[in-house]
């Protein structure tokens, strides 16, 4: 759906979230800095994967998976820019280290058929795509089963996703913004109003933290936690296999 808006995707995200999408995504990424293999599932243009690659130890390997070639091309271009920037920084410091400073690989694949062995991933992170996988989706159970299959025992699923503010006045204003402003601004900037209408409507109807916890428990996860952010409009979900 969002393949057609890839050229303006990042900019529209910044504008519609008042720049907070970076803060929320980084909160998700920080849960993944200490693990051996990190998968950014439905990685889009690669922001989360690149953040983990930049801030984690060199021993951490990062994978980004998406089924959109256009999104992955943008992610690969970002990686190339990050590598050039880091190379310049190293040269300015007069250190010819020859290190791969951007240890991330991007892979074209479907979330329901991941090209990985059983129990080989330490962390699976999903930033603002979990809703697309499970909201009104008949394949939701398949996606969650595939996440469980590829996670190691005690591995973690970490999701940052839209949520529902607890207070009625704030929830009313939030839903009004999603219903009116998101499709208007997104549509004007991208020419794809339908994509942003879906974004707004799916966010309005997406469950709160408690309901997501029940979904993850039913799928087979344990030790579910939920942390609301920014007055509850977004939440960080963690489930342990």
Image (cartoon, rainbow, N blue to C red):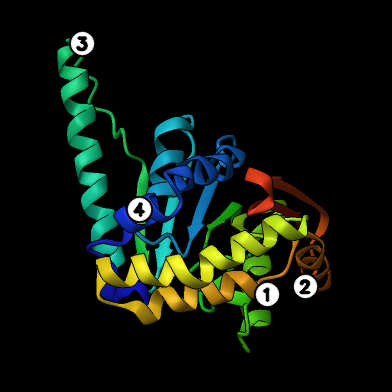
The answer to which image quadrant residue 162 occupies is bottom right
Give 212 or 196, whichever is nearer the viewer: 196
| Mark earlier in primary sequence (4, 3) | 3
Query: Where in the figure is residue 3, as x and y percent of width and height?
Result: 31, 74
Disc 3 secondary structure class: loop
Residue 93: assigned label: 3
From this view, report whether residue 174 is shown above or below residue 25.
below
Q: Which residue is mark 4?
A: 105
The quadrant of the rendering that contains the C terminus is: bottom right
Q: What residue is rendered at 74% in x and 63% in y?
A: 208
The single residue placed furthest to the bottom in the displayed view is 138
Q: Is residue 69 visible?
A: no
Could you tell whether 146 is left or right of 107 in the image? right
Residue 82 appears at what percent x and percent y? 25, 38
Say what secondary structure mark 4 lies in.
strand
Q: Are marks 1 and 2 in contact (CB under 8 Å)?
A: yes
Q: Nearer the viewer, residue 131 or 192?
A: 192
Of residues 206 and 3, which is closer to you in this image?
206
Q: CA distance from mark 1 to mark 4?
A: 23 Å
Gap between marks 4 and 3, in whole Å? 27 Å
Q: Locate the N terminus and report the quarter of the image it occupies.
A: bottom left
Residue behind mark 1 = 145
Q: Is residue 121 above or below residue 118?
A: above
* Residue that appears at 38% across and 82% down: 194
Q: Mark 1 or 3 closer to N-term?
A: 3
Helix, strand, or loop for circle 2? Answer: helix
Of the two numbered discs 4 and 2 on the same chain, state the one appearing first in sequence: 4
């Amino acid at each position: 759906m969002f393949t057609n808006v890839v050229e303006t995707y990042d900019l529209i995200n910044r504008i519609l979230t008042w720049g907070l999408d970076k803060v929320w995504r980084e909160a998700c990424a920080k849960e993944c800095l200490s693990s051996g293999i990190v998968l950014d599932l439905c990685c889009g243009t690669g922001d989360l994967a690149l953040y983990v690659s930049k801030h984690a130890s060199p021993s951490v390997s990062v994978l980004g998976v998406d089924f959109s070639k256009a999104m992955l091309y943008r992610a690969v271009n970002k990686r190339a820019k990050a590598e050039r920037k880091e190379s310049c920084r190293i040269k300015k410091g007069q250190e010819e280290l020859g290190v791969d400073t951007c240890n991330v690989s991007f892979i074209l694949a479907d979330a329901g058929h991941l090209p990985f062995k059983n129990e080989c991933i330490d962390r699976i992170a999903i930033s603002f795509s979990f809703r697309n996988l499970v909201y009104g989706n008949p394949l939701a159970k398949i996606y969650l089963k595939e996440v469980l299959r590829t996670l190691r025992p005690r591995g973690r699923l970490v999701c940052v996703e839209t949520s529902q503010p607890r207070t009625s006045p704030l929830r009313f204003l939030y839903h009004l913004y999603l219903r009116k402003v998101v499709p208007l601004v997104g549509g004007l900037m991208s020419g794809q109003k339908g994509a942003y209408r879906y974004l707004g409507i799916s966010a309005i109807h997406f469950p709160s933290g408690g309901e997501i916890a029940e979904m993850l428990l039913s799928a087979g996860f344990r030790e579910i936690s939920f942390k609301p952010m920014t007055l509850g409009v977004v939440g960080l979900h963690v489930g342990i296999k």
